Amino acid sequence: MSIQVDSKWNDIINYIGLKDEHLELLHDQKAFFEKYANEVVIDFYSRVLKNDSLSNIVLEFSTFDRLTKSQIIYFNHLFSRNIDYLYIMFVQKIGSTHFRIGLNPEWFLAGVNVYLDGVYKLCSQLDNGLDIYHAFAKRILFDTKVCLDQYDQLRIQNKII
């Protein structure tokens, strides 16, 4: 089984409609998307650089080189065939990092849209591109929920309203 999560996450997965066959479909195209990972991530950071507040956050806490490498790793994970406890912890760490550096959820969501745009363009090259895009959208929306849930948990812990 590709999806092995507790009931909290399983409810979200069921609501989104993410199924094992979506993960298998994405995994079947992993090599294709890995070829373009650098291109998608470079586009992502070119958009970040056009925004002063986002660019300042990046330069305060890291370098574009380091973040590009991290984003490529994350992008490639989106085509893995498993969602389990370790994967959720990986995504929660992303949410924690974004919270710690002060990236607000609105900018996080805008970044998700950049990935959706990039994958949409790539899917247009594939025979079953619509099915792959649909599966990718479900996958990244699940990750988005995990990250935003982490934001909420940290806000509560830090008594930020």
Image: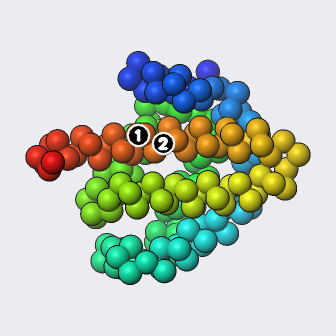
Marker disc for residue 146? 1
Q: What kind of element bears circle 2?
A: helix
Q: What kind of element bears circle 1?
A: helix
Residue 151, position in %: x, y? Answer: 29, 47
Residue 127, position in %: x, y? Answer: 88, 46
Q: What residue is drawn where x is 72% and y is 63%?
A: 36
Tag 2–tag 1 contact (CB < 8 Å): yes
In the image, 22 versus 79, the foreground residue is 22
Q: What residue is drawn where x is 57% and y is 61%?
A: 114
Q: Which residue is mark 2?
A: 143
Residue type at mark 1: give it. Answer: Val
Residue type at mark 2: give it. Answer: Asp
Q: How many residues crowd around disc 2 within 10 Å: few (fewer than 14), some, or many (20 or more)?
A: many
Determine whether, in the image, residue 8 is placed left or right of residue 151.
right
Q: How many residues crowd around disc 1 within 10 Å: few (fewer than 14), some, or many (20 or more)?
A: many
In the image, 43 versus 29, the foreground residue is 43
Determine whether, in the image, residue 45 is placed left or right of residue 61.
right
Whether residue 32 is visible here, answered yes or no, is no
Q: Quadrant of residue 138?
A: top right
Whether residue 117 is visible here, answered yes or no, is yes
The quadrant of the rendering that contains the N terminus is top right
Residue 50, position in %: x, y? Answer: 48, 80
Q: What residue is drawn where x is 66% and y is 60%?
A: 118
Q: What residue is drawn where x is 85% and y is 50%?
A: 126
Whether 83 is drawn above or below 96: the answer is: above
Colouring convention used in this rendered image of the protein = rainbow
Whether 156 is drawn above or below 63: the answer is: above
Residue 32, position in %: x, y? Answer: 78, 54
Q: CA distance from mark 2 to mark 1?
A: 5 Å
